[in-house]
Image: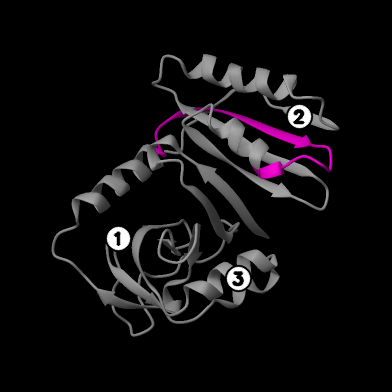
Amino acid sequence: MPCARANLSKSETFTIVRNVGLLVDSDMEKYPPIDSDGRGLKVGDWVRVIAVPLSIKGMPSDSREAFSKAVGHTFQIEAFDELGCLNLDMYPKVSCDTIYIEPFCVRRFRRYKKLSNAFQKRLAFLESLNAPRLEMTFKARLKPSEDLEAFGLELLALGPGGGFCVWPETSEVEGSISVEAANPNATSVLESVRSKLLSHSPPETIEVSEVRFIDRD
């Protein structure tokens, strides 16, 4: 089943990024880190996207468009997901999208002996996202006249991590807000988000979860 989500992080200078990929089945075989020419791939390699995977067929049109825009461009591998797909950040070269794409859809373009300071900083930020966190999810149906993305961004601005997705057809927005568990103000930050949600000029419906402890390790 396809999924797309929007993430906003204060550490990333308020850059809006839509992550476009597939929810994976744990029984699926992991792709080896090998490009279309049979060369090995690793984090930090620059690759050129040469094709779009068949797996995008069932995705929404904007997700398919994101993959199509990537073709012909070069990106630096930031990570591999649990299925072995490459995490490629298309911002700011092409769009605000981050795609997860199968390794056989790319060709290795360049491999540096040493990663740049900027890229190492980016990797450190991504690693921090795997730290234990407190998280709260929300789902709201707003009035048709309201701006769904503005609503989601307003909530994310209250916390250092999280993401959301919108469904314009049904005026719904769903997402999560998270704070590192080591942050002594984590609970108060999430409670302020809860108050913001519940005090919003009344949505049609709204659901807010309890605060959960998330440890991705």
Which label sits on residue 65? 3
Q: Is residue 73 magenta?
A: no
Can you give x and y, in whole percent of width and height, for residue 124 in the image? 29, 43
Neighbor class of circle 1 (other Cα within 10 Å; few <14, some 14-19, many 20+) is some
Can you give x and y, in whole percent of width and height, for residue 45 in the image? 27, 67
> Which element carries disc 1, helix, strand or loop?
loop
Check disc 1 and give the amino acid type.
Answer: Val
Q: Earlier in the sequence, mark 1 or mark 2?
A: 1
Q: Is 168 placed left or right of 61 in the picture?
A: right
> Which element carries disc 3, helix, strand or loop?
helix
User: Against 55, is 154 above or below?
Assistant: above
Q: What are the residue bounds of the magenta stretch?
A: 129-149
Marks 1 and 2: which is nearer the front?
2
Residue at 47 percent across and 71 percent down: it is 102
Residue tagged 1: 43
Which label sits on residue 51? none
Query: Cα distance, mark 1 to mark 2?
Result: 38 Å
Neighbor class of circle 2 (other Cα within 10 Å; few <14, some 14-19, many 20+) is few
User: Against 153, is 136 above or below?
Assistant: above
Check disc 3 and give the amino acid type.
Answer: Glu
> Which element carries disc 2, helix, strand or loop?
strand
Query: Cα distance, mark 3 to mark 2?
Result: 31 Å
Q: Earlier in the sequence, mark 3 or mark 2?
A: 3
Residue tagged 2: 207
